[in-house]
Image: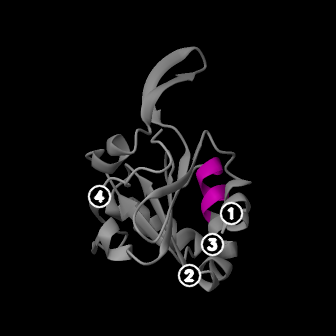
Amino acid sequence: MLEIGINAPEFTLPDQNGQMHSLKDYRGRKVILYFYPKDNTSGCTAQACGFAELYPQFTEKGAVVLGVSKDSVASHKKFEQNYGLPFTLLADPELAAIQAYDVWQEKNMYGRKTMGIVRTTYLIDENGVIAKAFSKVKAKENPAQMLKLL
């Protein structure tokens, strides 16, 4: 996990519609950047739906929500449509941002060691500096936790 107080690593990734997004596009706004393992799985769906439910309150506070996983643009589009997600999902199949934000780590699944995304959420301030960082977050609680921080 990256340290609080450092500049957030820059990235440019496609969203669920194939449009490119860069972190610098959001200067002047708070960014909730959350990394999750996989579209349409129970924990990831609970987290995404939580952010969707609270999305009007995030926008009221001038914050943008960006979800990132290694899933494809097409997978993100299906995920967005299945659950009516109102925020941007970024596809990172090459693991560029995932590795830059230090969330690609060894995980222990049922005694088997595998590499994967550790569910992590960063709050990035208006100047592109990491203000808060949470690793191994609880999917259902994370959206409310982030809203409370704002």
Q: Which residue is drawn at 33% across and 50% down?
A: 97
Are there few (<14), some (14-19), or many (20+) residues within 10 Å of tag 2?
A: some
Counting the numbered discs, the total is 4
Task: Give the x, y percent position of residue 85.
Answer: 55, 73
Instruction: Look at mark 2 in the image and give the residue it sits on.
Output: 62
Cα distance between the residues tagged 1 and 2: 13 Å
- N-term mark: 1 or 4: 4
Instruction: Report if the CB atoms under discs 4 and 3 are less than 8 Å apart.
Output: no
Instruction: Look at mark 1 in the image and give the residue it sits on.
Output: 149
Please name the amino acid that badge 2 sits on: Gly
Task: Give the x, y percent position of residue 14.
Answer: 29, 66
Task: Give the x, y percent position of residue 147.
Answer: 69, 67
- N-term mark: 4 or 3: 4
Instruction: Look at mark 4 in the image and give the residue it sits on.
Output: 10
Dot label at residue 78: none
The answer to whether residue 22 is seen in the rendering is no
Front residue of 146 and 77: 146
Instruction: Look at mark 3 in the image and give the residue it sits on.
Output: 52
In this rendering, the label closer to the viewer, 2 or 3: 2
Instruction: Report if the CB atoms under discs 1 and 2 are less than 8 Å apart.
Output: no
Please name the amino acid that badge 1 sits on: Leu
